[in-house]
Image (cartoon, helix red, strand yellow):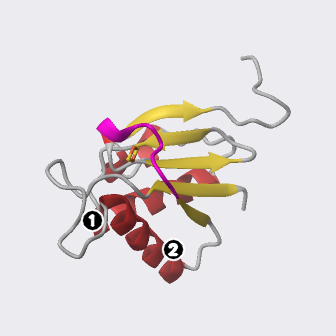
Amino acid sequence: MSQTLIVCTTCKFSKETAFSPEGKTGGELLREKIEEIQTSRKTGRKVVGHECLWACKHSCTIMLQDENKTGYLAGYFEPTDDAAEAIVDWCDAHENSDDGAVPFAEWPQGMRGHFIARIPKFENGVQDE
Ligand code: FES
């Protein structure tokens, strides 16, 4: 699998507070929920945490990188089970696509309105289109 899902670990728990009552950031909680789903589905997708992705106004944020396909930056997630499931569902759809362009009809409802940027694949340099 050539995908890596990056979760910003420093995104705030909510607009009002950085940390949950248990002392975790929203990004840390979202990463935990994503990893739980990945484990239950036995996906081989690599999930890594990374400090600030410089999209803080859109937190919680994630980025999907892929060696061979277009990647994506997405945000406006709350650290919930539903958000984590939508992210993993969308990563699965992306994995099953030829080039990373998932048809809109296949986007999980929980991903609609969450995309911020497309990240061109960087295989032999960015290709001119
Ligand atoms: S703290 Fe998450 S993008 Fe900046």
Nearer to me, 38 or 59: 59
Q: Which mark is residue 80?
A: 1
> Does 51 lie within the magenta span?
yes
> Does 55 lie within the magenta span?
yes
In which quadrant is the C terminus drawn? top right
Left or right of 63 in this view: 96: right
**Whole-Å distance between the Cαs marked 2 and 1?**
15 Å
The percent position of residue 92, horizontal first and vertical second, equals: 55, 60
Q: Which residues are magenta?
A: 50-57
Count of numbered circles on the image: 2
**Element type where label 2 sits in the image:** helix
Figure quadrant of residue 21: bottom left
Left or right of 31 in this view: 125: right
The reply to whether residue 129 is in sight is: yes
Nearer to me, 54 or 113: 54
Q: Which mark is residue 95?
A: none
The reply to whether residue 113 is in sight is: no
Q: Residue beneath label 2, please?
A: 38
What's under tag 1, amino acid-wise?
A: Thr
Q: Is residue 127 above or below residue 113?
A: above
